[in-house]
Every structure is written in structure tokens, then in C-alpha cells.
Image (spheres, grey):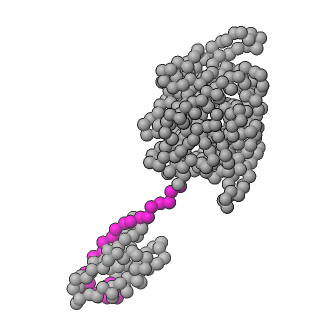
Amino acid sequence: MKLNKQDILKALESITIAGEGKNMVESGAVQNVVTFADEVIVDLKLATPAMHIKKRAEADVTKVIKEQVYADAKVQVNIKIEAPAKPQNPNLIKGKPIPGIQNIVAVASGKGGVGKSTVAANLAVTLSKMGFKVGILDADIYGPSIPIMFDVAMERPLSVNVDGKSKMKPIENYGVKVLSIGFFTQPNQAVIWRGPMAAKALNQLIFDAAWGELDFMLIDLPPGTGDIHLSIMQSLPITGAVVVSTPQNVALADARKGVAMFQQENIDVPVLGIIENMAYFTPEELPENKYYIFGKEGAQHLAEDLEVPFLGEIPLVQSIREAGDSGRPAALQTATLLEEAFENITKNVVEETVRRNENLPPTEAIKITTMAGCSAVKK
């Protein structure tokens, strides 16, 4: 018996592939039907590699041809898997800059406890005092402290409509826009998330927020060199990174790794420089004395060794801790040694950012090919 292609196609219309809703012919799963006397070859294209779907489709084709066309037909079913591309977050893959944000500076440290968040908060406040439009993203998912330092721990971001889309409105204080996972958790609630969940939350804080026009966005990274760091650098074209360390050898060893992370070939984020925190202690009653409790000029020597700029030093002063705990960063104080220290460091950060933007091409988000631009800061 010679089989007829139209009869076979009509029979195949009675088969619905699981999960697709349409019959096999209408959905385009049937790519071709070839007949030779009592033999028939059916080429199928499926959108899922699941073995049980493939076997079910093959069995259904064979059964319906034998039942509705010819019982003794010799049926061969060839299945090709052509799964559709999974929809990707365009911000994560392409590393698109956030509209309106000119420079994104990551503040990092190799280890915890060196005052990275304190430095980031005071940098942000000082930039604002200089007249820049500033935002700070607390990317330390597991230990967010920026809300406390800006005295906004009890605040909650509101929803605003931007171009027909609902966005989070950052909390603002001291002229700095702030977003943190800390706004969405209770003070006694631990964030126990695996890397992908943390990365998703960060992506929402970055791209689902109404940051508006900013000259600088500072990103307070968690300590170390891990998953969160890679997620941030995949999501955004970082203008440059600042590494914070104390002069202590243990801290310097980890700071060296932090610099190495940004300088890796497949990451290649410019290091704007190293800041030395807790550089020395001066008692209030002995203002001329300096006690190098954690070592002397260790971060400065590290910067020279790694051939990256040394951005300045911050003394170990009790009022810095008190200011952070009370939610009023020390840089807000006027006519003090601390204000001068943070101003000098911030000026160096701005100068290095300008130099970086003038002399280097825009940073790419890692593992992408599209260039994303960051213009120079205003002077």
C-alpha cells in the first residue's frame, strides 16, 4: 500500500504536544513528512528536551498513523530539540548603564571590619557637600548598615510612577539617595539567601528604582571577593573601584586580593585607589601625638607596590564611630580634622574619576561585548 502524505497530516492533527495547547501540525512541530510505499518518516521539532515528552510524541505519532491511516505502516519518527531562548534580564546581560547616572564607584574591602561602610557613607556625604548629586546602594546583603549610618533605618521606600512603570523611590537624607535591603527586613531578621536570590534582590534595587540624575552612585560592596561582587559587575559598567584597608598586615593581605579581583583580565574594572582607615590614633589630650596601633602606612605602601593611587588616610577617632551609630556621618561636622580628612580623600576620588574617564575607554560589564558609557564627572 502506498501511503498518502495528506492522510498522515490529517491524522497528526489529532495529537497535542504536552504544554503547547495546539495540535502537532498547527504548532509547527511537524517539520516534514516523507512516504515510501508502506514506510513513513515524520520529522518533529520540539521545544523541550524532556525525555518523557519526546517518548510520548514518538509513541503518539506511531499509534495514530497505524490506527487512522495504515495498521502495517513502518513509522520512523525523528525528533529535533529546538528550545526557545530563555528571556534574559537585559540589564544583567548587556550591562546597560542606569539612565541619568554618570559614574558608578564601587567601595570594597578584602575583609570585614576595616570601616568600608563608614568610608562609603562619609564619601557620599562629602560628595553631596561639594555639590554633586549622589546616591548610595547598600549591596552588603547579609550585613546592611547604611540605613543606620544615614539615620533612616525605620524608613520604607515608596512606590512612584516613572514613564508608566512602578519604581522604588530611594530614601534621601543629607542630600544622598539611599537604597538598601535593610529597608525590607526587620532589625532582628537574618537574611539567609543563596547567591542567586541575593543577586535578584540587588538587581531590583538597582534597576527598579527611581534614582533620577546622579553624578555619583556609590556601591557599598560586602567584604571579600564573591558572588555579590560578580553579580554587581555583571549588572553594571562600574566606572572604578575604591579599596579600603587598615594598615594591619592581615587586612592588607586581603586588600591585595580585592585589588587583584578588579584587575583580573575578564573583569578589568579600574582601581581608583586605596584608602587607609584607622591609620593612627591621637588622644584628645595629646593632639600632637600619633600612635600607630595597627601599623604605620601599610595601605600607602601597598598602593605603591600595586602601582595604584593612594587616596589618603583616616585617623582612628572615637567620634567617627559615634557619628555612624547615631546616624550622622562624621563628615557632616565642620571645621574638624575628620572633615578635612574626608574632603581630601573625596577630592582625590573625584580627580581619579575624572582622570580615568579622560584616559580610559568606558568600562564593560563583565562577560559582555556591548560597550556601556560613563561620562566624566562635573568639575
Q: Nearer the viewer, residue 11 or 288?
A: 288
Residue in the image at 67% along x and 46% along y: 213
Q: Which image quarter holds the N terminus?
A: bottom left
Using the image, determine if residue 216 lies above or below residue 41: above
Q: Nearer the viewer, residue 179 or 351?
A: 351
Q: Position of residue 331 (x, y in %)?
A: 73, 28
Residue in the image at 54% along x and 25% along y: 309
Q: Position of residue 202 (x, y in %)?
A: 60, 47
Using the image, determine if residue 169 lies above or below residue 225: below
Magenta span includes 67: yes
Quadrant hosting residue 42: bottom left
Q: Position of residue 101 (x, y in %)?
A: 62, 44
Using the image, determine if residue 116 lies above or below residue 291: below
Left or right of 58, for residue 194? right
Q: Position of residue 310 (x, y in %)?
A: 56, 23
Q: Nearer the viewer, residue 240 or 219?
A: 240
Residue in the image at 27% along x and 80% along y: 34
Q: Is residue 180 visible?
A: no
Q: Which residues are magenta?
A: 65-89
Quadrant hosting residue 38: bottom left
Q: Which image quarter holds the C terminus?
A: top right
